[in-house]
């Protein structure tokens, strides 16, 4: 008896010792300038204690809070849980306690941390995972959930991360839009209650809202001052970013997959991994946060982010579906003559039984339409090669028209509900990537197109509708809610196979514009198409919002016709070029439709773009004047060594008396270097107020403190200014 008591006491003392040691533990997630600090309290609960500017070794002195690192339903005192699970015995609560943590270096400047938590009763495990990118000041956060309960556990909420803030005020900047009107920005002060930024679209999830935000702490977000958090979710499916201000004015930010109608039945031993949520922070405003994301993206977030992107001419706005071999051969020759590096053949080249002559037929039948192209795609590839340029092609492999041979053979391959009328959007349906056979087919569309035409150097991968009638013929009746996750998993599988087989082919991520712009997808893609709206005026706003999180090197921006096909707006050719050249230049307006003067101007513009595109694509972005608050807007790019910079400025409203005289206070320059100023992409024989500064030199300090001063008068007047260190 005495021996048993002694044994029990030893166990109690051992557990007490573990609890004491746990209570002493501090877990830090650190980059060069940012720190996220967790502590284990006396009850063995993991608490978030700090997120902000790095405090280095002082993190151990941070006070323990009462705020769960990962709040759960039933045991956490928050309105919105990060995790809600129903266990095998019907218990609806989860109580997570600390088990252990580990940190290791997984790459140059990348520190990986895992914090293992376990339910206090059930064999149910949650691991909080982090990657800290030291130089880039970006933290990735995600969650891994698994269990060994006897029966499946049902997951109803399964967020990637939770962050807690304790400030007087919070100001949220959200990004929203619609087809041809993407990435608008608006800021609001958060008050008590819940504000959600979400999508329930499943596919093309960013059509109405974008999974990114800025959070101004205690004050509205500013460009160059103030404490700002930036976040974006790496996930192409439905998402939910929740901002919950509680009764004590604390803010809980919970981000991840939108689990609405998406409960997940987690089997014993199955590992459920949530998407990665990316965060950055700066005490110097949104500009710093943007540059953190851009530097991270070029190294880790975009396929081959260290390579310069090519210029291209697209046939879409010239021909739409109405073309033949002769017309395309002429456009290829024009593209080469203009100085472009690639010709892109857009929609309409395929379909036999149901030829793709408009958007209501042929999608899914990826055989060449021989009536249009009797010699096939290979002939056009050779035609491009003969002209000294590369060839690209449009695909939409995830979609199908009911008027197609594919649908006739496999009506069970589409996402739809039985006993419901088929719901079409853009005359098409979505192929069910939950089904491995469909995954194989979608992969084969891309793979066969490239193998059969080995000279293809570029693919425009489109995706033009979202999910309705969300049913899968492949998934069992009790797992229909898994569609929202299994589709994305299937999509990733296809992306990975394509990239493994075709690593050198450039691929554009297109989704009718900005419907699929996220860092989970972009890791497989070289660039993206942010909007079908090519109106240069609208593009200024669209690109202003987009580049808050995504770098201009991957943002395809095309010079299009005037009047613009989407808006009817008439704008000068120079203005259209100057806007497109602030990102990755391309063109839809066709040389055959240009006057000799326009053609000559365009040739010179393209040639001049090549002299500074390295600065735009690989330099740091600094925003000078916002189009939301100024009649004149401006931004600039600065090379890493601060030897080169290029400034873009546009006048959006005509000013009659005296002109617009807003000063351009430059940023990011070396104050001790001297820079020579030159205007680029000039209109021939046209005098400019900038002539007074042409060829003159000033120190970086002068340009940043006194600025560049010259008036602009006319709506759609634009300037590109090159700065070169002497």
Image (cartoon, rainbow, N blue to C red):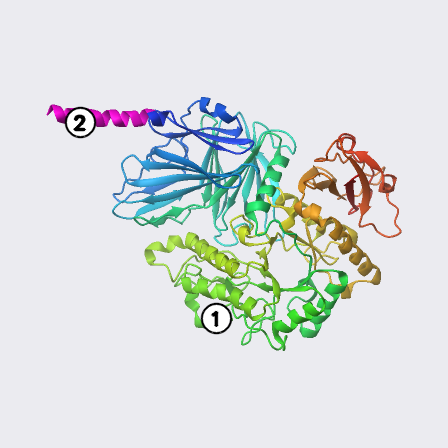
Residue 572 visible in this rendered orientation of the protein: no
On screen, residue 268 versus residue 515, left or right, reads: left
Write the residue at 75% across / 34% down.
665
On screen, residue 625 versus residue 280, left or right, reads: right
* Residue 305: percent from left, percent from top: 60, 49
Instruction: Reply above or below: 184 against 501.
Output: above
Tell me the quarter of the image containing the C terminus: top right
On screen, residue 123 versus residue 260, left or right, reads: left
* Residue 563: percent from left, percent from top: 74, 57
- Front of the two marks 2 and 1: 2
Q: Earlier in the sequence, mark 2 or mark 1?
A: 2
The quarter of the picture where residue 219 lies is top right
Most foreground residue, 335 or 416: 335
* Residue 28: percent from left, percent from top: 46, 31
What is the spatial separation of the Cα atoms under label 2 and label 1, in whole angstroms?
A: 71 Å
Boundaries of the magenta span? 1-20
The quarter of the picture where residue 60 lies is top left
Q: Which mark is residue 7?
A: 2
Number of callouts: 2
Write the residue at 70% across / 71% down.
329
* Residue 77: percent from left, percent from top: 38, 30
For mark 1, give the secondary structure: helix
Instruction: Reply above or below: 561 against 520.
Output: below
The quarter of the picture where residue 70 lies is top left
Q: Disc 1 marks which residue?
A: 406
Most foreground residue, 251 or 470: 251
């Amino acid at each position: 008896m005495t021996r048993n008591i002694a044994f029990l006491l030893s166990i109690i003392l051992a557990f007490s010792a573990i609890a004491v040691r746990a209570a002493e533990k501090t877990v830090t997630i650190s980059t060069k300038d940012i720190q996220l600090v967790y502590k284990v309290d006396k009850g063995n609960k993991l608490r978030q204690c700090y997120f902000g500017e790095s405090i280095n070794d002082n993190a151990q002195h941070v006070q323990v809070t009462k705020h769960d690192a990962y709040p759960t339903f039933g045991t956490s005192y928050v309105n919105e849980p990060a995790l809600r699970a129903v266990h095998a015995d019907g218990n609806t609560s989860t109580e997570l306690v600390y088990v252990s943590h580990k940190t290791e270096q997984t790459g140059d400047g990348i520190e990986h941390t895992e914090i293992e938590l376990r339910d206090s009763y059930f064999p149910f495990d949650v691991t909080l995972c982090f990657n800290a990118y030291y130089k880039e000041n970006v933290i990735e956060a995600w969650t891994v959930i698994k269990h060994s309960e006897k029966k499946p556990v049902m997951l109803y909420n399964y967020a990637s991360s939770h962050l807690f803030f304790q400030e007087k005020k919070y100001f949220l900047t959200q990004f929203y839009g619609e087809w041809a009107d993407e990435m608008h920005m608006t800021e609001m002060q958060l008050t008590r209650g819940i504000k959600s930024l979400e999508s329930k679209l499943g596919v093309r999830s960013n059509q109405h809202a974008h999974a990114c935000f800025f959070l101004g702490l205690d004050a509205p977000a500013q460009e160059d001052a103030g404490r700002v958090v930036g976040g974006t979710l790496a996930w192409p499916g439905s998402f939910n970013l929740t901002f919950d201000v509680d009764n004590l004015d604390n803010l809980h930010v919970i981000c991840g997959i939108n689990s609405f109608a998406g409960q997940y039945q987690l089997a014993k031993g199955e590992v459920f991994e949530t998407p990665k949520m990316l965060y950055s922070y700066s005490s110097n405003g949104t500009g710093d946060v943007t540059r953190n994301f851009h530097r991270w993206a070029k190294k880790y977030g975009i396929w081959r982010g260290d390579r310069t992107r090519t210029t291209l001419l697209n046939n879409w706005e010239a021909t739409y579906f109405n073309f033949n071999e002769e017309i395309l051969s002429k456009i290829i020759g024009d593209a080469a003559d203009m100085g472009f590096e690639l010709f892109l053949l857009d929609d309409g080249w395929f379909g036999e039984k149901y030829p793709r002559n408009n958007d209501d037929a042929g999608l899914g039948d990826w055989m060449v339409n021989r009536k249009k192209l009797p010699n096939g795609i290979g002939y056009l590839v050779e035609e491009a090669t003969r002209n000294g340029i590369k060839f690209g092609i449009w695909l939409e492999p995830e979609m199908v028209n009911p008027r197609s041979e594919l649908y006739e053979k496999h009506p069970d391959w589409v996402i739809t509900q039985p006993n419901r009328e088929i719901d079409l959007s853009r005359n098409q349906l979505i192929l069910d990537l939950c089904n491995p056979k469909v995954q194989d087919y979608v992969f084969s569309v891309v793979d066969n197109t490239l193998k059969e035409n080995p000279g293809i150097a570029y693919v425009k991968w489109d995706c033009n509708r979202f999910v309705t009638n969300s049913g899968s013929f492949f998934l069992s009746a009790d797992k229909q809610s898994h569609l929202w996750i299994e589709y994305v998993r299937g999509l990733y599988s296809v992306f990975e196979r394509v990239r493994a087989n075709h690593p050198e082919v450039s691929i554009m991520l297109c989704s009718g514009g900005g419907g699929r712009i996220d860092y989970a997808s972009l890791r497989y893609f070289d660039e993206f198409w942010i909007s079908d709206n090519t109106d240069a005026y609208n593009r200024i706003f669209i690109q202003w919002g987009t580049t808050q999180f995504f770098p201009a090197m991957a943002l395809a921006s095309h010079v299009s016709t005037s009047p613009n096909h989407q808006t009817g707006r008439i704008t000068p050719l120079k203005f259209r070029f100057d806007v497109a050249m602030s990102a990755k230049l391309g063109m839809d307006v066709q040389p055959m439709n240009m006057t000799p003067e326009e053609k000559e101007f365009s040739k010179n513009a393209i040639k001049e773009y090549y002299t500074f595109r390295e600065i735009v694509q690989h330099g740091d972005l600094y925003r000078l004047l916002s189009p939301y608050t100024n009649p004149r807007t401006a931004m600039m790019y600065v090379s890493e060594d601060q030897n080169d910079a290029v400034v873009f400025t546009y006048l959006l409203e005509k000013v009659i008396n005296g002109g617009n005289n807003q000063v351009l206070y430059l940023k990011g320059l070396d104050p001790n270097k001297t820079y020579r100023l030159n205007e680029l992409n000039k209109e021939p024989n046209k005098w400019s107020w900038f002539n007074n500064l042409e060829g003159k030199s000033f120190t970086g300090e002068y340009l940043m403190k006194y600025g560049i001063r010259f008036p602009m008068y006319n709506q759609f007047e634009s300037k590109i200014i090159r700065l070169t260190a002497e």
